[in-house]
Image: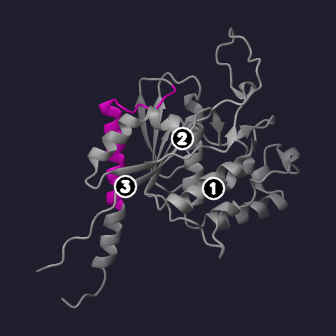
Amino acid sequence: MPPPPAPTKPLRILMLHGYTQSGPLFRAKTRALEKHLAKAFPSGASLVYPTAPHRLSPADIPVWDNSAPAPVSTEPLDCYAWWTRADTNPPTYTGLAQGLARVAECLKTEGPFDGVVGFSQGGALAGMVASLLETGRPEAFGAYAESVKSGGKWWAGGLEKWKDLKFDADTYPASFLNADGTVCHAPMKFAAIYSGFKAPHPAYGAYFSPKIATPTVHFLGSVDTVVVEDRSLALVDVCVEPRIVRHPGGHFLPASQKEWVGALIAFMRESLESKVDKKEERVEDMELPF
């Protein structure tokens, strides 16, 4: 009798929350999506929700309504961020290294993952994480650093005054490397980005040049006033063959509406199948004795 088929593993997805959220809060907001994904894939789906390392105080919370009173208390809240913005123009990201280290820890202890899903700041981070795990990205950071030293194109356009800033954007994050210097996780098979955006400062150029080759889908809310469409499209523009899905809502992740959940599931299936197809093509090219 032929041996029984090997048991299939559930789809593993890294879930990155937005600014002012946490892993548990993001999970509570996406429970419907989690259930849909578990039903959509024969082996099920397992979603992992890390919490960002930077705990925020009321002073860190943006006041979207200008008529609202400014926060008075400075006590930390149950709100977290992957980084905070420094007062530069374009902005740089304070604490990004710690945010990436938290993700790297999750990749090493909870992985391997098939893909990553991120919302808002987590969407921006999902694009950066997908980039970091791609083949050749450490070398791209090396080329970037050399370009900075030589005053090359990274600093064109009158931005030379930022060359002497001391922050950790010009080298590949050490947290993403193993002890032997290899990248800690295989490339992601897909990245789903909701209301994401691109880091605008040229210091982060190595994340986006060469373009992000990981299959990406970008969900944009037509009435999103927190991350306006132009910011999201800047991230779309640095991805290879990105897919755009527009929904009629604002700044949120549509976790229960069938049309938008269906678009995500279709994208995931296509991304996973394309990986299988490439593998099968390589096998078919082999000279087999039958």
Q: Where 218 sits versus 11, above or below?
A: above
Select label 3 or label 2 by which is in front: 2
Alpha carbon distance from label 1 to label 3: 29 Å
* Residue 279 visible to the viewer: yes
Q: Residue furthest left?
A: 1
Circle 3 SS class: strand
Q: Residue furthest bottom?
A: 289
Select label 1 or label 3 by which is in front: 3
Label 2: how many residues lie within 10 Å, few (<14), some (14-19) or many (20+)? some
Label placed on residue 76: none
Q: Give the mark nearest the N terminus, 1 or 2.
A: 2
Who's the residue at 33% across and 29% down the image? 257
Label 1: how many residues lie within 10 Å, few (<14), some (14-19) or many (20+)? some
Label 3: how many residues lie within 10 Å, few (<14), some (14-19) or many (20+)? some
State the residue position of label 3.
11
Which sits in the foreground, 28 or 237? Answer: 28
State the residue position of label 1.
209
Select label 1 or label 2 by which is in front: 2
Specify the quadrant of the image occupied by residue 225: top right
Q: Give the mark nearest the N terminus, 1 or 3.
A: 3
State the residue position of label 2.
23
Mark 2 and mark 1 in contact (Cβ < 8 Å)?
A: no
Q: Give the mark nearest the N terminus, 3 or 2.
A: 3
Alpha carbon distance from label 1 to label 2: 30 Å
The amino acid type, in three-letter code, at marker 2 is Gly
The amino acid type, in three-letter code, at marker 1 is Ser
Where is residue 135 shown, x and y percent of the image? 55, 67
* Residue 238 visible to the viewer: no
**In the image, which residues are magenta?**
251-274
